[in-house]
Amino acid sequence: MHALMTMKELIDEQCILVDIKASSKKQLIQDMAG
C-alpha cells in the first residue's frame, strides 16, 4: 500500500513538473510572438 502511495506521489510530481514546463513554454512562445 505504501509503495503504491509513493508511486502516485512520484507521478503527481512528474505531472506538476510537466505543467510548469508547458506553461513556461507557452509563456516563451507568447513573448516571442508578442
Image (spheres, grey):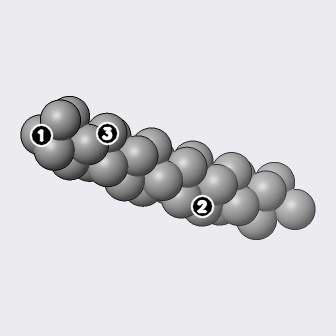
Question: Which residue does the numbered mark 1 point to in the structure image?
Answer: 3
Say what secondary structure mark 3 lies in: helix
Q: Residue at x 60, y 61 (%)?
A: 24
Residue 26: where, in percent of width, then height?
Answer: 68, 51
Question: Which residue does the numbered mark 3 point to in the structure image?
Answer: 8
Label 2 – label 3 distance at C-alpha:
24 Å
Residue 3: where, in percent of width, then height?
Answer: 12, 40
* Discs 3/1, front: 1
In the figure, 8 relative to 16: above or below? above
Q: State which tag comes first along the sequence, 2 or 3.
A: 3
In the figure, 26 relative to 32: above or below? above
Towards the viewer: 22 or 28 = 22
Q: Quadrant of residue 28?
A: bottom right
Label 1 – label 2 distance at C-alpha:
32 Å
Q: Is residue 8 left or right of residue 31?
A: left
Label 3 – label 1 distance at C-alpha:
9 Å
Work out which residue is located at the far right of the displayed protein and give it. Answer: 34
Of the 4 image quadrants, the one containing the C terminus is bottom right
Determine if residue 25 is in view: no
Of the 4 image quadrants, the one containing the N terminus is top left
Amino acid at dot 2: Ser
Question: Which residue does the numbered mark 2 point to in the structure image?
Answer: 24
**Circles 1 and 2: CB atoms closer than 8 Å:** no
Residue 20: where, in percent of width, then height?
Answer: 53, 58
